[in-house]
């Protein structure tokens, strides 16, 4: 997952009093298994199960106290996509495909971290809370694949995931003893990613008897 603001989340700043935090997406990753169901030679459905980890950095600042600090958090979700694919044949073994669809995501937990920038009573706290256990994305993919006769299919492409509503509520807090300042914001959870996929060779089973008789018959 690549922090690309035109499609994915953009950095934004939340502020309370003289305390502010800038929340920025950083590189994340996703892995899982995919199943394709061929409808025709150039049409297919794709589904599967993916583990996604979106990473964010919070840069905290209290200008009046000359305090700065940064922290990182990772947000995990599990995705089940359903996409409709259209292939364009570019050569004997090379294909381009585009797809669109939707996915349901399961968000298992909230996230929280804290740092002590000065080693004294100053504390920065960064927290993210899921807005629901389940949410939904709109999906768009484009890529190229090379199909071999016996070694499977190799795919390289790009994808975007756009949630239908924000996925994470964030709070950033500066605490000094009993004094506290808290700023709030929302993270949409949109992502842009580079995809590498490998599809195993599909050896179609021939119809009819599978046993071939040898030279000696009884």
Image (cartoon, helix red, strand yellow):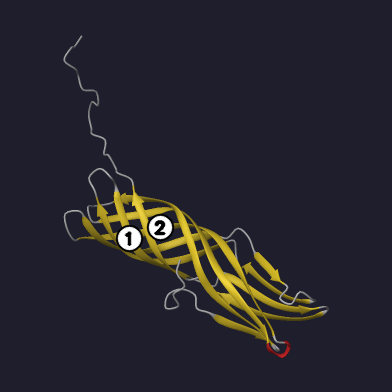
For mark 2, does the 10 Å Cα neighbourhood hold few (<14), some (14 to 19), or many (20 or more) residues?
Answer: many
Residues packed near mark 1 inside 10 Å, few (<14), some (14 to 19) or many (20 plus):
some
Quadrant containing the C terminus in the rendered view:
top left
Seen from the viewer's position, the closer of residues 72 and 167 is: 72
* Residue 121 falls left or right of residue 167: right
Whole-Å distance between the Cαs marked 2 and 1? 19 Å
The one nearer the camera, 14 or 44, is 14
Vertical relation: 124 (above or below) 213 = below
Measured from the top left, where is residue 21 in percent x and y? 63, 81
Query: Is residue 37 or residue 129 the one in the foreground?
Result: 129
Q: Which residue is mark 1?
A: 156
Q: In what element is the residue under mark 1? A: strand
Q: Residue at x 40, y 54 (%)?
A: 47
- Confirm whether residue 188 shows in the render: no
Q: Earlier in the sequence, mark 2 or mark 1?
A: 2
Q: Residue at x 50, y 65 (%)?
A: 28
Residue 11: image location, x then y, percent: 53, 79
Measured from the top left, where is residue 58 in percent x and y? 61, 75
Q: Identify the residue shown where x is 30% and y is 44%.
A: 201
Mark 2 vs 1: CB contact within 8 A: no
The residue lying at 60 percent from left, 65 percent from top is 132
**Residue pointed to by mark 2:** 82
User: Quadrant location of the N terminus?
Assistant: bottom left
Asked whether 24 or 34 is in front, the reply is 24
Residue 70 image offset from top left, x and y in percent: 63, 75
Q: Is 62 situated left or right of 106 in this image?
A: right
- Answer with the quarter of the image where residue 16 lies: bottom right
Height in image: 138 above or below 151? below
202 vs 82, left or right, is left
Of all residues, the one furthest to the top in this rendering is 218
Helix, strand or loop at label 2? It is strand
Where 190 sits versus 68, above or below? above
């Amino acid at each position: 997952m690549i922090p690309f603001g035109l499609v994915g989340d953009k950095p934004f700043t939340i502020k309370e009093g003289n305390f502010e935090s800038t929340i920025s997406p950083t590189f994340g990753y996703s892995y899982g298994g995919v199943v394709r169901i061929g409808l025709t030679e150039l049409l297919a459905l794709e589904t599967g199960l993916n583990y996604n980890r979106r990473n964010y950095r919070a840069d905290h600042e209290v200008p009046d106290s000359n305090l700065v600090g940064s922290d990182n958090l990772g947000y995990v979700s599990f995705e089940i996509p359903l996409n409709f694919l259209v292939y364009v044949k570019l050569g004997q073994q090379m294909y381009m495909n585009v797809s669109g669809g939707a996915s349901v995501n399961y968000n298992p937990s909230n996230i929280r971290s804290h740092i002590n920038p000065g080693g004294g009573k100053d504390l920065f706290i960064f927290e993210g809370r899921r807005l629901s256990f389940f949410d939904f994305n709109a999906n768009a993919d484009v890529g190229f694949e090379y199909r071999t006769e016996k070694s499977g299919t190799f795919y390289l492409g790009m994808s975007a995931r756009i949630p239908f509503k924000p996925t994470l509520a964030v709070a950033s807090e500066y605490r000094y003893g009993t004094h506290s300042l808290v700023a709030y914001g929302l993270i949409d959870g949109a992502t842009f990613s580079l995809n590498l996929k490998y599809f195993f060779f599909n050896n179609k089973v021939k119809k009819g008897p599978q046993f071939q008789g040898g030279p000696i018959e009884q």
